[in-house]
Amino acid sequence: MATTAAARLTNTKAGRGARRLAPDSRVPAALGAAGGTRWRRCILRRYLRWCVVMSCACSAPDVARHGGVASSEAASSEALPSTEPLLPVPLDVAVDIPLATLGQALFFSPVLSQDGRVSCGSCHAADRGFADGKPLSEIPERPRTATNSQSLFNVRFFYRLGWTGRFESLDAHLDFLIKNPKLMGTDWSKVVARLAASTTFKAHFDRVFSDGVSENNARRALIEFERSLVTPNAPFDRWLRGDKRAISPSAERGYQLFKNYGCSSCHQGMAVGANMFERLGVMRDYFRDHPSTSDADLGRFSVTRREEDRYVFRVPSLRNVALSAPYLHDGSAATLQDAVSIMARYQLGRDLAPGEVAEIVAFLESLTGEYRGLPP
Ligand code: HEC
Ligand code: HEC
């Protein structure tokens, strides 16, 4: 049963290699290591400037040295295919299917919220790349969020979480969500009481755990579900693994532009991002042209209060990015074309021709992988 489920979770190849974790495996530790950020950014700036000036092809070894934090899970899964700055998502990841299936039920149930009206799925929909398709999340009974909802695909590989990278682990982030009055507005003891009072959930917990409903078990299940949201086998990954017909010539040219212009100096590694911080507006002042309307624009400054962190964000992952429009922390870029043009202009100081934007978009579309979902 577990093997079949694992096979359905990813793809056939993945299923063969998938390992079932012991049900008592512990909540995963912090996803990324702390520290080294300023150093990384400093190296990155110099590297980026060099790329822009030389119009060079950014080579992987340089990139990997300062950005490799989040790749640790990947590195062990297979031999690196080449010197490319991007790595394929592993075909087999370990998922405890019964645990993740319980987590999925919790994720889509309003039982987590105090007023029983909101679930994680209210803002992270499976058919929208686990984002919500809106510039800012607007759901009944809750204030509008300050930022655009993020895709949760491949979150297990991310270095820090959220637009500002404020959270270092899924566990710490989950705590924030449960207690935040604007989201779930509750606490774990009340969640546990509601779960224990629900015959369906109580029976489900009893099937998965010998000690039934508890805070720790609910956390473990939710986190295992988040960690199961992996999308292997994107056309671009097949191309990386040697199938040169997996992507169109236009997408292939887009990838060359992505490297030559220096997009890959920030969006790199397995998640094509999510492993470093960078300023929005490296080469041109973004906020002079788009006057700030919200504290959310301050980026990491709101976490660290350090001047150098003003307008600095965690570089987002571009895996499955075609599924999660609109874009940017403020949801201001309606289409992928808009987001690519903004990036070229403000991060690289270039105004791209429409044909170049289209090719980069074709490449980004080839980053959509396969997600089969968990068994019901
Ligand atoms: C009201 C809408 C809303 C609800 C409900 C919600 N989220 Fe989110 N989620 C967001 C927004 C907006 C962000 C981006 C937050 C930020 O960093 O500014 C986000 C970010 C995240 C991230 C970080 C992703 C990344 O790229 O780092 C994770 C993980 C996450 N949410 C999981 C959950 C889980 C689990 C639940 C349920 C317990 C949940 N969310 C409920 C709107 C929501
Ligand atoms: C200097 C680092 C850097 C470079 C270079 C860079 N980006 Fe970005 N990218 C970022 C940051 C930081 C964000 C998040 C900005 C925000 O939302 O405030 C981002 C956001 C994006 C987004 C939106 C993702 C989402 O989920 O909303 C896309 C698409 C994107 N970049 C593509 C590109 C492309 C294509 C290039 C090259 C033309 C590029 N980037 C170059 C740092 C960079």
Image (cartoon, helix red, strand yellow):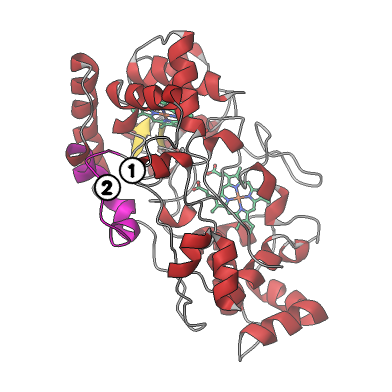
Residue 169 placed where, x, y %?
44, 60
Horizontally, residue 69 falls left or right of residue 119, namely left
Closer to us: 202 or 336: 336
Residue 254 placed where, x, y %?
40, 23
Closer to us: 88 or 207: 88
Image quadrant for the C terminus? bottom right
Q: Residue 81 got which mark?
A: 2
Are the two marked residues, 1 and 2, in contact with CB atoms closer than 8 angstroms? yes
Total label count?
2
Q: Magenta residues, as a range?
A: 62-85
Residue 187 placed where, x, y %?
65, 68
- Assign a secondary structure to mark 2: loop
Q: Label 1, on which residue?
A: 242
Image quadrant for the N terminus? bottom right
Q: Amino acid at mark 1?
A: Gly
> Is residue 68 located in the magenta-colored stretch of the structure?
yes
Between marks 1 and 2 in the image, the one whose residue lies nearer the viewer:
1
Residue 216 versus residue 38 in the image, above or below = below
Q: Residue at position x 33%, y 39% from top?
A: 268
Task: Using the rendered image of the protein, determine whether residue 267 is visible from the camera's viewpoint.
Answer: yes
Q: Quadrant of residue 78?
A: bottom left
Q: Amino acid at mark 2?
A: Pro
Q: Is mark 2 within 8 Å of ligand 2?
A: no
Q: Residue 205 got which mark?
A: none
